[in-house]
Amino acid sequence: MALSVPAIMRTTAARLSALYLLLFALCAVLLVLYMTSLSARMLTAQTQETINDEVLGLARAYQRGGLPVLVRVVEQRSRQPGANLYLIADANGQILTGNVQSLEPGVIEAEGWTTEPFSYRRFGEGELERQRNPVSDPNEPAQNEVQAEGEKGHNAIALVLRLPNQMIMLVGRDLGEPERFRAVIRRALMLALGMMGVGGLLIWFFVGRAALKRIDSVSEASRRIMGGDLSGRLPVTGAGDEFDRLSENLNSMLARIATLNEGLKQVSDNIAHDLKTPLTRLRNRAEATLSGKHNTSDYRQALEGTIAESDQLIKTFNAILMISRLEAGYSSESTTRVDLAAAVHDVVELYEPVAEEAGVTLETSVQGAFAVNGNRELIGQALSNIVDNAIKYSTDSTSRPTVRVTLERIDGEIRLAVSDNGQGIPDDVDRARVTERFVRLEKSRSQPGSGLGLSLAKAIMTFHNGRLALLPGNPGLSVVMSFPGREDR
Amino acid sequence: MHMPATQSSSEIAYNGSMKILVIEDDREAADYLQKAFAEAGHTAHVAGDGETGFALADSGDYDVMVVDRMMPRRDGLSVIAGLRSRGNTTPVLILSALGEVDDRVTGLRAGGDDYLTKPYAFSELLARVEVLNRRASAREAETVYRVGDLELDRLSHSVRRAGREMTLQPREFRLLEYLMRHAGQVVTRTMLLENVWDYHFDPQTNVIDVHISRLRGKIEKGFDKPILHTVRGAGYMLKSG
C-alpha cells in the first residue's frame, strides 16, 4: 500500500495520531518546564540556606575577635576545596581578601541578596598569570582547585553585608552545580519525549496501517457490491473483533437487501404477467369495438366491460402492492389487541348470505375468547379471503356443502381453521405452491378472483408472526391460520 | 372513466348544487374532476397546489373539499390541519395514492372526513362527496328516519313499513339505518362496507349485493313500490316513489 503524504493525512488513524502527538508534546513541554523551574527553585533555596549558615558562622567569628578573626576565618575557608565565595572589601569596594578575583560591577553596592545571578571570576582560573590582588596572599594554594571552566567566569548568587566599620562582606555560592543538574534533567526529559514520539509513530505505523488495511478491504468489497454483485459479501477474518462485527452486520444487511430485491423482482415479474394479460384484453376490446359497425348500446356495453375490467385490474394491483408491503416488513402503527372470536363472527356474518345463496352451510365453532396483537382489518381481510375461497370450492362437494370455521388453542398456538368438504387440492399439486402469487389451479380458472387471495392471507399471517398452512381435509381442504398463542408478545 | 352525466346521475335526487373545492396538483385529473362535477350539477373550483388551496379554502365558503395528499408547496394533510386549526369545519375528502390502513388513519387524524384511494371511480367519489355535503348531514341528530312509508326508529330499534312491523337482524338494521340517513343519495358498496361493517378492503365476492337483496326482500316484500334502488355502475339508493 503506497500512500503519499496527503493521502496518509486523509486517513482517520493518521489524523488521530497527529492530534495525540500534538497533545502529548504539549503536555511533555509543560512537564519539562515545570520540573526544571521546580528544581531550580529548590536548589536556590538550598543555596541560600547554606549561605545563611556561612554568614551565621562568620558573624560569630566577628563577635569573638573582630575584623582580624573574621579575615582569618575567611581566608581559611576560602582555601577549602569546593569553597563558597568569600569577599571582604573596604567601604569603596576595593577587594581586601577572599577568593573572588573580580565581580560584575555593582554587585557589592547593594546590601542583601543579589536579585540576579551574577558572574564572577575566582583567583587563578582561566589564565595562568599570577596577577595578584594586593590584598590576597600570593602563596594561596586555594587557586589550584578552582576549575578552569568557561572563559567568561561563573554565575553565582550571594548575600552582601555591610560590617559595622562600613567594610563590605560578600558570601556567595557558585550556581554551576544546580545548573548542571537542571541541564541533566532537561536532557533526560527531552530524550524520553523523543523516544516516546518515535514509539508512537512506530505503533501508529504498524497498528494503524493494519486497521487501514482492513478498512480498505471492506471498502474494496463494498465497491464490488455496489458495482452490481449483490451476492458479494464483506470479508470476515474470524477474529471476532469490531471489524468482524461490522462486516457481519453489513453482511446481514446485504442479505436483507438481496431478499427485498428478489421480492421486488418477483413482484415486477408478476405485475408484468398478471397485469399485462388483462390490459391486453382491455385494449383488444376497445380496438374491436372501434373497428366494427356498432350501435350505441354496443358501445355502452363495451365501455361498461372496460370499467369492470379496470376495476378488477385496480383490485389486483392493490393486492400486489399490499403483499409487497407486508412482506417487506411493513410496520403498522395501527396494531391493537384484536379479538379473534369477534373477527370470526364479523366475517362469518358478512359471508353468511353469500354462503346461503350458494347453498353452502357456514358453521362456526369458537371455543373461548382469543385476543392477539394485530390489525383487525388485515385479519378480517385474510379470513374473508379464505372463507370466500372455501365457499367457492365447497360447492363441488359430493355431500351437503359445508364450510366450518373453528377457533381453538392447540399446543400454545391459536388456530383459526377454515375447512370445506369440497374436492380439496389434488395430490399431485404441491400444496404450498397454492399460496404463491397468481397460482390458480386449472379447474378454478373459471372462478372469479385474482389468484392473490391466499398469497395475501399468507403475507398477513407472516406480518402477525403467524403461519398459514394448507392441510388436506377429509374430504376437502383445511386452511389453518396459526397465531402465536402467548398472551403478551 | 365512467362519466356520471349518463343515466346514473339522472336517477339521483340532489340536495341542490354544491360548491366544491378541488385541491389537486395533477392538472388533467383536476380538469376532469371539475368537468365531471359540473356535469353532475355542482360547481367546482380548482387549486393546483397546497398554498393556493389553503388560501381559497380559507376565504371561500365551500360545501365540500376534495384534497389530494401529495402536492407541491404544501401537502394535503398540512392544508387540512391548518384549516381545522383556524376553525374551518368544511367536510374534507382526502384523495391519495397511499391506501394502507395507517395512511388512512393518519389522514383522518389530520382532520379529513373521508379517504379515497387512487385510482377511484368518479361515481364513488361523487357519492362520497354528496354524502359529506355539510348541508345534508343534519339527519345525524334525528331519532326517527322516514322515507315514504318506511320508518326506522333509532332508539327502539324498530322498523315499520306502512305501519307493519318488520324484524331485522342487527346488521340489517344498521345497513338500513345508513341507507335511510342518506336517503336520496347514492351509497356505494365500499361505503356500506366501511360504514356498516367497518372494513376497508374489497372482498373477492360482492358480499354487499347479497346483503342488500336480503334486506330488499324484507322491506319490499308484499309492497308493490320498490324503495331500495340499484344505481347502475354506482351503488344503491333508498328513495320513495
Image (tube, coloured by chain):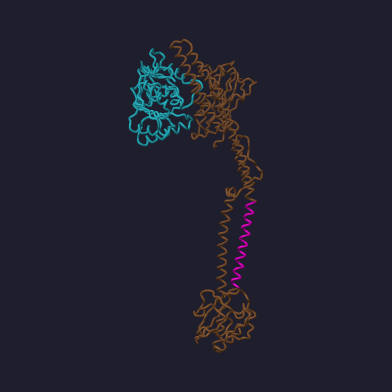
Left or right: A449 in relation to A144: left
What segment is highlighted magenta in the picture?
A177-205
**Closer to the camera in the image, B204 or A14:** A14
Choose top left, top right, bottom left or bottom right for residue A171.
bottom right
Q: B93 above or below A37? A: above
Q: Which chain appears brown?
A: A
Q: Does the magenta run of residues contain A204?
A: yes
Chain B shade: cyan
Q: Which quadrant is the C terminus of chain A positioned in?
A: top right
**Closer to the camera in the image, A362 or A96:** A96
The picture places residue A230, in percent across and down from the top left corner, at 61, 35
Left or right: B1 in relation to A440: left
The picture places residue B171, in percent across and down from the top left corner, at 44, 23
Task: Please say whether residue B142 is visible from this viewpoint.
Answer: no
Left or right: A117 in relation to A204: left
Q: Does the magenta run of residues contain A459?
A: no
Rendered residue at 35%/28% (across/down): B63
Residue at the extreme right of the image, as rendered: A238
Left or right: B123 in relation to A483: left
**Closer to the camera in the image, B99 or A198:** A198
Q: B58 above or below A430? A: below
Dominant secondary-structure state across the stretch colored magenta? helix
